[in-house]
Amino acid sequence: MNVPNWYELLLLGAASFRVWRLLAEDDITNKARRYVTRLGPDWQKEGDPIPNGYRFQVMQFILCPWCLGFWVTLAWWGAWQAWGHGTLVVAAVAALSLFAPLLERVLSDE
């Protein structure tokens, strides 16, 4: 079993955060989150009653960086253990995809 050096650790950590953010908060995964939590594709947040089959605990798990974030990080670490170089190549892309939204937040007028 290998232990990542500081560069690999930062790269895997940034990639883990990016994947957690994609799963938990990005708009592109809204449909999947609604399916998993049984909200349905047409549910609107304001004014509509929450469906009877809504899975509150599942949504809490998805939104929690300590909960889902742990499992995402464990998956990255396991992939790195199995296929080190290839995982770091993919992790670099995921980590680099953090820069655009972070720069947008820093440079925006809001």
Image (cartoon, grey):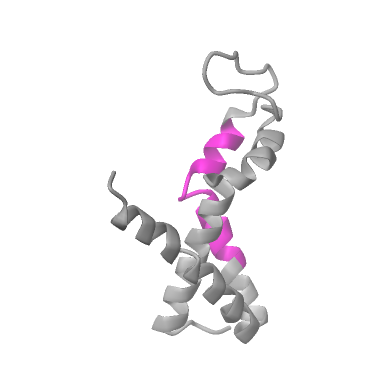
Q: Position of residue 21 (x, y in %)?
A: 51, 52
Q: Identify the residue shown where x is 61% and y is 75%.
A: 90
Q: Identify the residue shown where x is 54% and y is 63%.
A: 73
> Dividing the image into 4 quarters, which one contains the N terminus?
bottom right
Q: Position of residue 41 (x, y in %)?
A: 70, 30
The residue segment tinted magenta is: 57-75
Q: Is residue 59 left or right of residue 83?
A: left
Magenta run includes residue 18: no
Principal secondary structure, stretch drawn in magenta: helix
> Dividing the image into 4 quarters, which one contains the C terminus?
top left
User: Relative to 31, does residue 56 appear above or below in the rendering?
Assistant: above
Q: Position of residue 68 (x, y in %)?
A: 55, 50
Front residue (pair 15, 70) = 15
Q: Quadrant of residue 51?
A: top right
Give the farthest residue toward the front.
109
User: Relative to 19, does residue 66 appear above or below in the rendering?
Assistant: above
User: Relative to 72, does residue 49 appear above or below in the rendering?
Assistant: above
Q: Identify the residue shown where x is 53% and y is 36%.
A: 60
Q: Identify the residue shown where x is 61% and y is 79%.
A: 81
Magenta run includes residue 59: yes
Front residue (pair 11, 56) = 11
